[in-house]
Amino acid sequence: MFYLDRNQSIGYAVSHVYLMAQHGACYYHVMMNIKNRFKSSTSLGVFKDVAEGYHLEEFEKQFSDMSQKYPKVAPYLKKDVKFEKWSIGHFKGNKYEVMTTNIVETLNNMMLKARKYPITTMIDFVLFTMRQWFFTQCQESVLLTIPMIPKREAILRGRFDKTGSLMP
């Protein structure tokens, strides 16, 4: 997964080098583009809720509400940026709740404690922490009782058919 600020030439190059990678628009940059283009910071909170909607039904309702409140912003998000670039529910790849280009900042903050240790211990710490993140996500997904977007539901059904469990 690569997040770019809608730079098409970089996205084109990335797609030729990393064939399985998906290109998404950075949530923060889309938000700043909305703020600058439409001079509206009140729509940003609503945009955040819409962008984080995992379920299509939830997304459609929130986007419809946003379209009514901010009629100029909605067409920009739908046609210019496109849903599959910024919406978790429409994204074709795995986002793992990473919505911005600041993953480096996230990892740096996570490793603050581990920096004083030898490199091998630091790597073990990173691996352990990421395993915890993914385990937590898997545990939460097992508890879901509401319909999911079709792609996510197909993945979970496929896992269950193969292993008898929703976890990978």
Image (tube, helix red, strand yellow):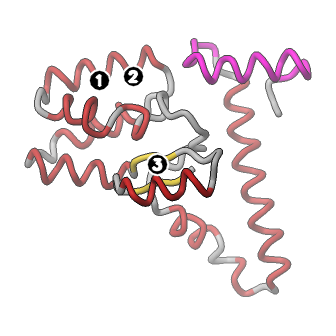
- Could you tell me residue 148's position as x and y percent? 57, 17
Front-lying residue, 128 or 12: 12
Looking at the image, is 106 positioned above or below residue 69? below
- Could you tell me residue 112's position as x and y percent? 62, 77
Q: Cα distance, mark 2 to mark 1?
A: 6 Å
Badge 1 is on which residue? 63
Quadrant showing the C terminus: top right
First in residue order: circle 2 vs circle 3: 2
Query: 10 Å neighbourhood of mark 1: few (<14), some, or many (≥20)?
Result: many
Q: Amino acid at mark 3?
A: Met
Q: Which mark is residue 99?
A: 3
Query: 10 Å neighbourhood of mark 3: few (<14), some, or many (≥20)?
Result: some
Residue at the extreme right of the image, as rendered: 163
Query: What segment is highlighted magenta in the picture?
Result: 145-165
Mark 1 secondary-structure assignment? helix
- Could you tell me residue 10's position as x and y percent? 44, 60
Image label count? 3
Mark 2 secondary-structure assignment? helix
Q: Amino acid at mark 2?
A: Phe
Badge 2 is on which residue? 59
Location of residue 142 (image quadrant)? top right
Q: Cα distance, mark 2 to mark 3?
A: 16 Å
First in residue order: circle 3 vs circle 1: 1
Task: Kindly check if marks 3 and 1 are in contact, taking CB atoms under 8 A apart as contact.
Answer: no
Mark 3 secondary-structure assignment? loop
Majority secondary structure of magenta residues: helix
